[in-house]
Amino acid sequence: MEIYTIGFTQTTAEHFFDRLIEAGIERLIDVRLKNVSQLAGFAAVRDLPYFLEQLAGVEYEHAPLLAPTEDLLKAYRKRTLDWDNYERGFLWLMAEREIHNVLRPEDFNTPTALLCSEATADCCHRRLLGEYLAEHWSDLRMEHL
């Protein structure tokens, strides 16, 4: 099973949607806590579901349960929490929420991408989420678009 991840900052809408189309993505799960920021441009919730459907035939789903808490995110953004501690906190949160039981491997039979804002997955919770699921499910691979 493969799970894809994608970010929308530091890219054009054309490159973003082309990556989804080329990978054959049919469903996008938005794992941002808040999807309404004016800074999100084409990835703001008021536009993204329409663009996904019209340009790429992709279904949109917002899943804030897969996002960090407001407190965890604020602490990391304000740099009162470093990446290692943020990672530990986020993985603990996923375990506490039992995300491996909330989601099921069958949910990813449809080619699915996890969306967050970060340009790369290196320091992004979408990568941590995929790694968390890989620890609980067998034969899971991640591809960062």
Image (cartoon, grey):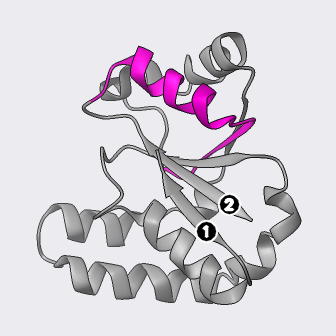
Q: Nearer the viewer, residue 1 or 63?
A: 1
Q: Name the residue: 22% across, 69% down.
A: 76
Q: Residues within 10 Å of mark 2 (few under 14, many from 20)?
A: some
In the image, taking residue 37 as reference, residue 62 lies left or right, namely right
In the image, taking residue 10 as reference, residue 91 lies left or right, namely right
- Dots 1, 2 in contact, CB < 8 A: yes
Q: Residues within 10 Å of mark 1 (few under 14, many from 20)?
A: few
Is residue 17 shown in magenta?
yes
Specify which label sits upstream in the sequence, 1 or 2.
Answer: 2
The region drawn magenta spans 11-33
In the image, taking residue 41 as reference, residue 54 lies left or right, namely right
Q: Nearer the viewer, residue 26 or 35?
A: 26
Q: Position of residue 56 (x, y in %)?
A: 67, 19
SS at circle 1: strand
Taking the image as drawn, is residue 69 in sight?
Answer: no
Instruction: Examine the image and state in which quarter residue 68 appears.
Output: bottom left
Instruction: Examine the image and state in which quarter residue 12 appears.
Output: top left
SS at circle 2: strand
Q: Name the residue: 61% across, 68% down.
A: 141
Q: Amino acid at mark 1?
A: Arg
Q: Nearer the viewer, residue 69 or 42?
A: 42
Question: Taking 56 as reference, is 111 above or below it?
Answer: below
Residue identifier under label 1: 141
Q: Position of residue 38 (x, y in %)?
A: 35, 24
Question: Taking 48 as reference, is 97 above or below it?
Answer: below
Disc 1 and disc 2: Cα gap in Å?
Answer: 5 Å
Residue identifier under label 2: 2
Q: Amino acid at mark 2?
A: Glu
Q: Position of residue 74 (x, y in %)?
A: 26, 63
Location of the N terminus by quadrant is: bottom right
The extreme right residue here reads 106
